[in-house]
Image (cartoon, helix red, strand yellow):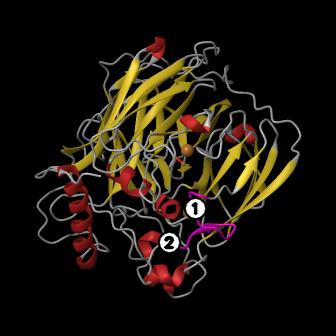
Amino acid sequence: MMPGRAEEIIMRFTRRSFIKATSASICLPAIVGRAWAAEGGAPLPIPEVMDLAGGTMGELTAQLGKSRMLQGVETETAGYSQAFSGPLIRVKRGETARLKLGNTIAEPVSVHWHGMFIEGAQDGGPHSPVNPNEVRDAVLDIDQPASTLWYHSHIMERTGAHVWYGLAGMLWVDDPDAPDSGLPNTYGEDDIPLVVQDRIFGSNGAMVYTPRGPSLMHGYRGDEILVNGAIRPEASVPAGLVRLRILNGSNARIYHFAFEDGRSFAQVATDGGLLPAPATMTSLTLAPAERAEIVVDFSDGAAVRLLSGPDTNSPMGGMGGMGGMMGAMASPQTDANGMFEVMRFAVNTGLAAKVTALAPTLAGAPVPEFGEPVRRRSFRLDMMGAGGMMSMMAGGGGGMAINGDSMDMGVINVAAPLNETEIWEISAAQMQHPFHVHGTAFQVLSNGGKPVDSAKVGLKDVVLVDGKAEILIRFTRTADAATPYMYHCHILEHEDAGMMGQFTVA
Ligand code: C2O
Ligand code: CU
Ligand code: CU
């Protein structure tokens, strides 16, 4: 690979990050002498739409860029055909979506279509890199329920860094034949994408990514919250019902969303598409890579903030005094109620309130048809494997595993038969892990020792494993040994440290 300017920048990212880590990363609120301010309240950026319906050819080129996220400095970022993140891609069920994938960054990247039911050869995982200055064709046969998916780079040991700097975007599947459920659907007005990500910025405004020791074990978390690439922005919404399609695009942080005034909202969709009926709630937990669509009523005209509770997911729970020692994780400052701000909403009566009531059931929700399971497999997510936690605490990496094996690109861990329903039992002793499977969607049968009501949870491709989870799963697309599917923890530092396996479907 020819070293170039881009490569220098990537290397600088790393070097700066390293300097930062030794001085102040674990640090906390006030960084002395920083050249920037992080003020929220700027208008929520609405991603540009790349509509691939009707055979329009799309293009996604990984690039480096500069973004204005902070006041006073520019931040070096990465994106697909833009400075940070990527366009919101829309595809239609029943069509073939085509894209040219390019890469002007001096290291391989990929475009993995997270949540899409497509063959391994098109899945965009670690075996399908887009090398620097190369162009690759993506040909995606879209056949799955309408849903909120996303795409991101997925290179062996680099996924965490790539997503952190910006190589991730949203993708919506539309189903023209599904009955209209009457949900708000005016893009950017009452149907709004929200990609929520936490970040750490160094004193010079550069994003800092240095997972090691505790920040590798917990997963790398930040103390500033970005929504669609802006710090705690403000959305302008009509005085009616608004659909928020939320993606937790963070590397590791688990959010516990709630509105400041305690208002209830209705969850209408999950990873794999609509729920059979809206589920009313006042708080929503979303682990990394999970999506939820919620409908919020703004008809009272009041401004309100969306907050989150802190992420307490930690492997140190059972290790006595170490909890305190390991508590030095970057985290947004919380208020007196223990909550931090994610973003704000202001009602604009100049916008048309097109939807004012929600149907009691959602026509067009996918009906899961798994049938009787024919076999059971177990997956044990392990943070202690080869090398172990002590090495990680001392600043080492690696050592994470599934069933004792760290991810090895040359080893196929599971061969799953096509169209056979299986039960997968996933266990995780030390902390909660968001377990993700490529190529399909599954139903959660139980989690944390309790049965799960699938009507309330819907189809999923990520499950936050609480001790032990059982899922009902079936594969309807194939993946060969050259381009297998992955299953892994979606705390990206865990994935990159080896908590991933690969499987074929035939
Ligand atoms: Cu979001 Cu293996 O992926
Ligand atoms: Cu995926
Ligand atoms: Cu994990």
Q: Amino acid at mark 1?
A: Asp
Residue 220 rendering spot, x and y as whole percentages: 41, 64
Residue 322 rendering spot, x and y as whole percentages: 50, 85
Question: Residue at position x 30%, y 36% from top?
Answer: 44
Q: Work out whether mark 2 precedes mark 1 in sequence or the reverse, and give the earlier one.
A: 2
Direction from residue 467 to residue 207 in the image, left or right: left
Q: Amino acid at mark 2?
A: Gly
Direction from residue 77 to residue 170 in the image, left or right: right
Front one among 245 and 57: 57
Specify the segment rendered in magenta. Answer: 398-410
Front one among 13 and 243: 13
- Indicate the quadrant containing the C terminus: top left, top right, bottom left or bottom right: top right
- Residue position marked by numbered label 2 in the rendering: 398
- Residue position marked by numbered label 1 in the rendering: 408
Question: Residue at position x 48%, y 34% from top?
Answer: 245
Judging from the image, what secondary structure is the residue with disc 2 in? loop
Front one among 324 and 119: 119
Closer to viewer: mark 2 or mark 1: 1
Q: Is residue 219 above or below residue 479?
A: below
Quarter of the rendered structure image containing ligand 3: bottom right
